[in-house]
Image: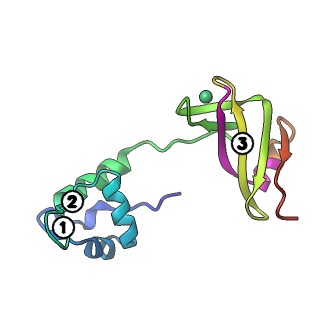
């Protein structure tokens, strides 16, 4: 889950470089650069690029207000429908990435497109009584 960053430390009338903003908020410079691609306005007419305090504060406040999507244990996120859905025929494939974590993939009940979510081995065990889960691409014992 993404780290929660408080906008309260940002001074409205200050301006920040990527490094200063990162240090202030306790995130990496790369994170601040990613925020720029996510819509954070940056003064890029000269180097170093500057972020205005009120723009940064507004961006972080708006971002924290966005509702987090919570999926029920047997729901998946369909990229085509852009929302929660159930698995077609209650069938899913589990692709383990590590011995404890992996990805559950299924077909969307509504559009039959690919949908999925990251899941633990424990969640698979929990879902096993209500879904058919096939373990694919076994890398871990
Ligand atoms: Zn769908």
Q: Is mark 2 within 8 Å of ligand 1?
A: no
Marks 1 & 2, CB-CB < 8 Å contact: yes
Query: Is 18 part of what is drawn in magenta?
Result: no
Q: Earlier in the sequence, mark 1 or mark 2?
A: 2
Front position in the image: 69 or 40: 40
Rendered image quadrant of residue 27? bottom left
Determine which residue is flagged by label 1: 50
Which residue extends farthest top? 110
Which disc is residue 105 wearing? 3
Q: What is the span of residues highlighted in magenta in the rendered image?
A: 112-124
Q: Which of marks 2 and 3 is nearer the N terminus?
A: 2
Specify few, some or many for label 3: CA neighbours under 10 Å numbering under 14, 14-19, or 20 or more: many
Q: Which residue is drawn at 34% across and 58% down?
A: 35
Q: In whole angstroms, how far apart are the C-alphas of marks 1 and 2?
A: 6 Å
Question: Which quarter of the rendering shows the C terminus?
Answer: bottom right
Q: Which of marks 3 and 1 is nearer the N terminus?
A: 1
Q: In whole angstroms, how far apart are the C-alphas of marks 2 and 3?
A: 38 Å
Rendered image quadrant of residue 22? bottom left
Q: In this view, does 34 lie to the left or right of 24?
A: right
Q: In the displayed structure, would residue 122 be above or below residue 115?
A: below
Query: Is 118 part of what is drawn in magenta?
Result: yes
Q: Position of residue 108 (x, y in %)?
A: 67, 30
Kindly state the secondary structure of the residue where label 2 is placed: loop
Determine which residue is flagged by label 2: 42
Specify few, some or many for label 2: CA neighbours under 10 Å numbering under 14, 14-19, or 20 or more: some
Q: Where is residue 97 in the image (x, y as percent from the top left)?
A: 73, 60
Q: Where is residue 90 in the image (x, y as percent from the top left)?
A: 79, 31
């Amino acid at each position: 889950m993404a780290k929660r960053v408080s906008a309260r430390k940002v001074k409205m009338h200050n301006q920040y470089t990527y490094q200063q903003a990162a240090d202030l908020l306790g995130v990496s410079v790369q994170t601040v650069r990613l925020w720029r691609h996510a819509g954070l306005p940056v003064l890029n007419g000269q180097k170093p690029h500057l972020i205005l305090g009120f723009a940064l504060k507004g961006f972080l406040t708006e971002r924290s207000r966005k509702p987090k999507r919570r999926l029920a244990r047997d729901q998946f996120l369909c990229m085509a429908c852009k929302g929660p859905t159930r698995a077609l025929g209650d069938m899913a494939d589990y692709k383990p990435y590590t011995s404890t974590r992996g990805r559950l993939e299924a077909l969307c009940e509504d559009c039959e497109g690919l949908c999925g979510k990251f899941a633990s081995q424990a969640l698979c065990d929990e879902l096993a009584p209500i879904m058919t889960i096939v373990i694919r691409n076994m890398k871990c014992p």
